[in-house]
Image (cartoon, rainbow, N blue to C red):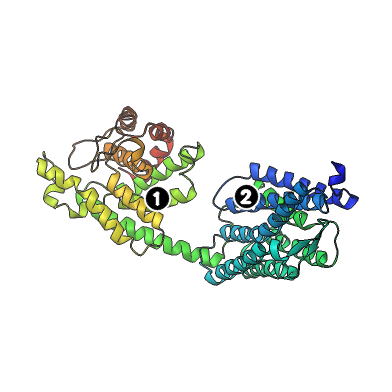
């Protein structure tokens, strides 16, 4: 077997380096905390592993006399060239996600993907025309007539990453900038060196080292929350969000206060929902759904849950006596009207997931776990999670506060007991279990916002 492989001290060094880097990258992928930002780092590391393995095969099999191994050599070379631009593209995506950069950057991405398209088109013809690389009759690799083009195209993508990085230099730490800069710089230098000299390949190592530092940075908690963004931009965004939220809360309070006894109902349920979601996140309840962004959206959506009540006449809404079936149906209709109003109110909003969540909260917060609720009689997990959370908070507040349709309130323990007894019937039992764990927080909310 040894005579079929190209084993020299240079080859051995390169293969060891490739496999060592692949092992480190695999360890990072397995141990990296998965979230929307880090998924791009995982993609990048995964592509680098494929890059490292294909590189090691090209070193081992170069010049092999075996026809079967020569096929493997040609495939590994194709993969080696194919994955290169995607390494840098995935890393640029990671930087975008890391910076919470929501701007479209059409020109940057259009330029990158057009260039990658050209790169791949040339690569497809390379095995037949020797454009990027070719093989001699003795199966030895050599650069093709258009090898320079692969360097230029990769250079363009790397340059795009450099430009974007430099434009955002002021809003990231020195360590983060160093990691990102190093990721682009080392392989660029290595690639230009290898244009003139065949020898030990440091490209994979050059890409692995900054990923290791990023990984250590993440696990030392120096990254990943609200670490980026210009202070002035953050302040203005917070100011706009606060204005928007306060406007919605005030509008919702105007609707709620037609009941005359709801007081700070909206603020209380916002706090209930926030506390419940944080407890669920802490205890890994619905972990694939409840994250920081989900909680942020739900807190924004909550105030609009009963906005449909604006369509109910005062004669019905303020009626303290028994309602007729027709009046009950009019009240039930507030969820349908509320969903329509929410959609109109948030028409300007760019966050489609927020709009959908707010509609779900308004439309389905009177659905019940056993299917006995309205308007559609949904049951269990067919009820959106946001509405199941809202239902729990809304009913609890109704139990502990005065309403026109009931004469007294329940003490906290009795209210909690009713909620607990409603698990499996009215409410999601998993959420009820978590709700029982936030009694101290609920008491503080009631002390702060009254009943």
The residue that appears at 64% across and 48% down in the rendered structure is 221
Relative height, residue 40 to residue 381 (above, below): below
As drawn, the label of residue 450 is none
Front residue of 71 and 11: 71
Quadrant where the C terminus is found in the figure: top left
Quadrant where the N terminus is found in the figure: top right
Q: Are marks 1 and 2 in contact (CB under 8 Å)?
A: no
C-alpha gap between disc 1 and disc 2: 30 Å
* Residue 233 visible at all: yes
Q: What residue does disc 2 label?
A: 42
Crowding around mark 1 (Cα neighbors within 10 Å: few <14, some 14 to 19, many 20+) is: many
Q: Which callout, 1 or 2, points to the residue nearer the camera?
A: 2
Give coordinates of residue 83: x percent, y percent.
66, 57
Relative height, residue 173 to residue 275 (above, below): below
Q: What residue does disc 1 label?
A: 299
The residue that appears at 74% across and 68% down in the rendered structure is 147
Q: Secondary structure at mark 1?
A: helix
Mark sitting earlier along the chain (1/2): 2
The residue that appears at 55% across and 48% down in the rendered structure is 35
């Amino acid at each position: 077997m040894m005579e079929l492989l190209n084993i020299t001290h240079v080859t051995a060094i390169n293969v060891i380096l490739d496999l060592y880097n692949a092992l480190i990258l695999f360890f990072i992928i397995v141990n990296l905390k998965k979230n929307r930002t880090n998924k791009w780092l995982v993609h990048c590391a995964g592509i680098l592993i494929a890059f490292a393995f294909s590189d090691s095969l090209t070193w081992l099999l170069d010049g092999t006399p075996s026809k079967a191994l020569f096929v493997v050599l040609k495939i590994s070379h194709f993969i080696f060239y194919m994955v290169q631009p995607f390494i840098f593209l995935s890393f640029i995506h990671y930087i975008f996600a890391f910076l919470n950069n929501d701007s479209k950057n059409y020109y940057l991405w259009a330029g990158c993907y057009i260039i990658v398209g050209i790169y791949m088109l040339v690569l497809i013809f390379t095995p037949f025309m020797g454009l990027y690389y070719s093989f001699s009759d003795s199966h030895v690799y050599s650069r093709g007539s258009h090898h320079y083009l692969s360097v230029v195209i990769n250079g363009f993508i790397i340059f795009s990453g450099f430009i974007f990085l430099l434009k955002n230099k002021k809003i990231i730490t020195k360590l983060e900038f160093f990691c990102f800069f190093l990721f682009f710089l080392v392989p660029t230098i290595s690639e230009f060196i290898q244009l003139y000299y065949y020898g030990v390949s440091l490209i994979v190592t050059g890409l692995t080292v900054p990923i290791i530092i990023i990984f250590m940075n993440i696990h030392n908690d120096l990254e990943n929350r609200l670490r980026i963004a210009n202070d002035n931009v953050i302040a203005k965004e917070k100011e706009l969000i606060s204005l928007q939220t306060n406007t919605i809360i005030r509008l919702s309070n105007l609707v709620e206060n037609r009941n005359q006894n709801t007081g700070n109902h909206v603020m209380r349920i916002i706090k209930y929902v926030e506390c419940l979601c944080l407890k669920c996140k802490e205890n890994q309840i619905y972990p694939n759904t409840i994250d920081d962004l989900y909680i942020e959206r739900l807190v924004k959506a909550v105030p609009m849950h009963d906005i449909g009540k604006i369509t109910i006449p005062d004669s019905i809404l303020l009626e303290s006596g028994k309602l007729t079936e027709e009046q009950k149906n009019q009240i039930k209709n507030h969820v349908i009207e509320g969903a329509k109003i929410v959609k109109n109110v948030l028409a300007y909003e760019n966050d489609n997931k927020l709009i959908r969540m707010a509609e779900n909260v308004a439309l389905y917060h009177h659905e019940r776990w056993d299917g006995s609720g309205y308007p559609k009689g949904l049951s269990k997990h067919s009820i959106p999670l946001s509405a199941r959370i809202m239902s729990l908070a809304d009913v609890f507040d109704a139990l502990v506060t005065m309403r026109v349709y009931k004469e007294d309130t329940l003490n906290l323990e009795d209210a909690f007991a009713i909620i607990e007894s409603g698990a499996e019937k009215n409410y999601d039992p998993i959420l009820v279990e978590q709700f029982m764990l936030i009694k101290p927080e609920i008491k503080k909310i009631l002390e702060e916002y009254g009943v």
